Amino acid sequence: MKMRSFLAATAVTALLPFSATVASAITLDQLVAGSTLTQGDVTFSGFKFDDRFGTDTTGGLPDRTDAAFPGDRSVDASEIGITTSSTSSTVSLTATIDPAISIAGEGSPTLARIYDFFFDFTVTVAGTSVRTLDSVALGDGDLFATGNGVSEIIFDIAGISGRNDLEIFEAPGLGFSQSSDTTTLASVKSLDFLGQIEGDTRDGDTAGISTFTITFDLGGVAPPPPHVIPVPAGLPLLLTGLVGLGLARRARRG
């Protein structure tokens, strides 16, 4: 490589900051197969999944396969997209089900139409980080229900004392609804979350969901942003001089 080309490339590189690593969207079946998601100093791993009407693809959860009746909704792990995002003090995991779940009870006041699946994962703050998991919230869900239908998301948190679950639900027939839930954590580095997402309808009822988010509040100082490589003070002048020499050589050859 010629000196001018090398210096020009160096200058461009020096002017560009390192880009931060951002976790990409991935489907739950890939995560169940062993992939992980990392957002800054937080990693989501150990994903497990089991649908009431599907085959066991978890490698860990017991298979509960039941026969589905017409109108029941089976869910496959490949239908659930998982993304992560963060602010200076939080990290979030969002699950999006596509196509969205929507069930309707029909034909019998006693035979329920349902959806029901388990969804587990582990969240871990890197050992090299000073931050900890201080609290967690479940919300931003679009679950719905009408009549006596019920739509519900529950996450049990393994290994903590006190209140150890999160729940959001729609149960209009019972007069209950809860769109968000939060609990404090004991400033820990890692926790297991054991989730169940379910809906139940009878004749004339509806229920469903397509997305929800779990957000972790982190205590401690966030990792510093990527550093920008400083440009040496004399580099722009040096580049200008080299360009001038090149123009002079071309002029003499003409």
Image: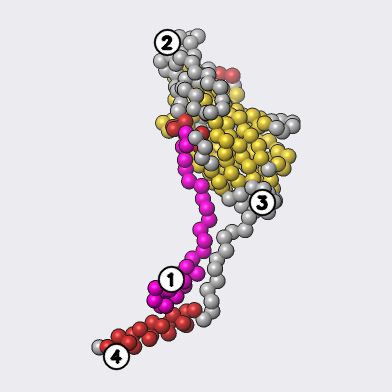
Which of these two is toward me, 92 or 182?
92
Residues in magenta, as a range: 1-30
Q: Nearer the viewer, mark 2 or mark 4?
A: 4
Q: Which kind of residue does numbered mark 2 sit on? A: Gly
Quarter of the image with the N terminus in it: bottom left
- Three-letter code for the amino acid on which mark 4 is drawn: Arg
Q: Position of residue 143 (x, y in %)?
A: 51, 29
Graded by Cα atoms within 10 Å as few (under 14), some (14 to 19) or many (20 or more), the crowding at tag 2 reads few
Tell me, for residue 107, which label it has, or none: 2
Quadrant of image for the C terminus:
bottom left
Q: Which residue is mark 1?
A: 9
Earlier in the chain: of badge 2 and badge 1, it is: 1
Depth order, front residue of 93/172? 93
Left or right: 159, with 5 as reference point: right
Which residue is painted at 42% across and 17% down in the image? 71
Residue position for label 3: 128
Earlier sequence position, callout 2 versus callout 4: 2
Nearest the camera: 15 or 175?
15
Identify the secondary structure beneath mark 1.
Answer: helix
Q: Residues within 10 Å of mark 1 (few under 14, many from 20)?
A: few
Label number found at residue 252: 4
- Say what amino acid the circle numbered 3 marks: Thr
Please give the name of the residue rendered at 51% of the width and 64% of the height, measured from the top-left corner. 17
Residue contact between numbered discs 2 and 1, judged by CB atoms under 8 Å:
no
Residue 147 appears in the rendering: no
Q: Mark 4 falls on what kind of element?
A: helix
Residue 25 visible here: yes
